[in-house]
Amino acid sequence: MRLLRNSTMGLVVLLAMFLLSGRVVAEESGSPATDEESSSSATDEESSRSKDAGAASEDSAESSSSSSDESDGSTQEAQASPASGDTETDADLATDAEPATKVEPVSEVPEANEARDQGKEVNPLQSPELLLRFKKMPVANGMNLYKPGTGLTLTSENGAFSLATRVRVQLRYQVTGDEGPPEHVFQIRRARVQFKGHAFNKHNKFKIELAFSPRDLSMKDGVPHRTPLLTWYLEFDSLRDLTVRVGQYKIPYSRQRVVSSGDLQLVDRSIANGEFNHDRDIGFDIRSKDLGGLGGRLRYYLGVYMGEGRDFGDKNATPDFKLHYLGRFEVLPFGKFKDYKEADMARNPEPKLAIGAAYSFHHGSQGLRGVLGTTPEDGGTTDYHSMNVDYVFKFGGFSSTGEFHLRNGTRRPGEGSTVVTPARNGLGWAVQAGFMIPRLPIEFAARYSGIRPLGDETSLSANNAVGGGLSWYPGGHPWKIQADYFHTWDDDEDTPAAHAFRMQLQLAF
């Protein structure tokens, strides 16, 4: 906790320095005053005051000089604006015998000048431009848009604020079976509400996603065991090569896990992804979508997370500082494209390719699958090293994506049981491909995925899955109907193979 707190404090200081520097530049560029203008104005003022009172003029001059030393930019701005109609003249100053520090600068913000005209006190140390950001402002009619799949977006007239709302639902019917009688279920697989946008400027972004389906809430006997909060993060992208994201969100480890469940070309993700993905966690990272300004050809991610997954709070606090560390690098040799959406709906006329590699170290994982999985019976922890390589390729309606996973961990037994559960060390892979029928919003796709144990001391079992499906996209990914069939089996001849048929309807608006 101390390490994360110190890191966060450093991050806050860095951001504060950056924002402050931007504010200073904005204030200095508003009405600059040269040294000669400041000196001339100060001399005229002192001369005017000396004609009325000798001792008083000397005190006023000293007060003016002291004020100039303490508030460098604001005093120069005030002295450089004697010609403005809203500024007091030298004669007015001499008659009122007010100290020179009361001369207020003319602001470019009408509300600040109006307050001065009404005799209201305006704090010279407070930026009127900043105060204006907290005032009520109308919503720009021409900038309010509705887009299917994105939802309704509201934007302020000055463009400093925006909010987009989105609702998504997936209805799924599924039939599963092995050697026994088949079972079927009709469920609301996912029900999500999303809010995203920016605040105060376009570089301060946020995203909130809530989940309400029984599976998302881990409902058991009618009682939810998870909060509906899936995602809530803030992102600051003022710097192209150093974007900061902090909050709870998907860890950028494997491609298919980061791809939204609403943008898949089959009904759901692979079994390898289910075993090796890092899901969501609370923490922060630095990243860039266009490292070096090469047109989006290079990306990177470096993150530190609590390592406990969703819903981590004060009750989960531990005295140690065992965290989850991650690094990922991506190369897009032919330029950027929609590589985090499966299926080539754009039917790219030129080949597009993205290759990614990631490494993570999870120090003291309490789950047998990192932030996921059950807790060992002995109550101990595991130090996991994980590696991932993935790719996505799109060209002319054809698309292919694949992943390879490696996980190796060392158990640290607890005192809960004499039986120590081994770590889930193993390998995993998935390869899939799809093709969009020309001139039709229909795609055929297929996938093969496998899991293998690694070493003798592992609790991971082998598993395989192969299948394919058909997708109809009348409204793209936001409005689609998908169906697939998968055959799964393991290496144990005594275990019967399983079959699953799934049909799913999705609507996002």
Image (spheres, helix red, strand yellow):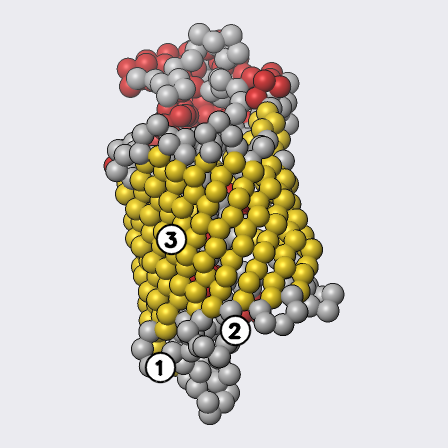
What is the quadrant of residue 7 in the picture? bottom left
Q: Which of the marked residues, 2 or 3, is nearer the chain's N terminus?
A: 3
Which residue does the image show at 37% across and 70% down from the upper left?
452
Crowd around label 1: few <14 · some 14–19 · many ≥20 (10 Å):
few
Distance from the alpha carbon under mark 1 to that under mark 3: 27 Å
* Disc 2 from disc 3: Cα separation: 24 Å
How much space separates mark 1 and mark 2, taking CA atoms?
A: 25 Å
| Residue at 58% over, 32% down | 475
Q: In this view, does 386 lie above or below 256?
A: below
Residue occupied by mark 2: 496
Badge 1 marks a residue whose secondary structure is loop
Q: Mark 3 falls on what kind of element?
A: strand
- Residue toward you, 280 or 69: 280
Instruction: Identify the mark at residue 431; answer none if there is no mark.
Output: 3
Q: How crowded is the residue under tag 2: few (<14 C-alpha within 10 Å), some, or many (20+)? A: some
Label 3: few (<14), some or many (≥20) within 10 Å? Answer: some
Q: Mark 1 points at which residue?
A: 457
Q: Are marks 1 and 2 in contact (CB under 8 Å)?
A: no
Q: What residue type is labelled 1?
A: Glu
Check the image and report above or below for 61 versus 412: above
Q: Nearer the viewer, residue 257 or 415?
A: 257
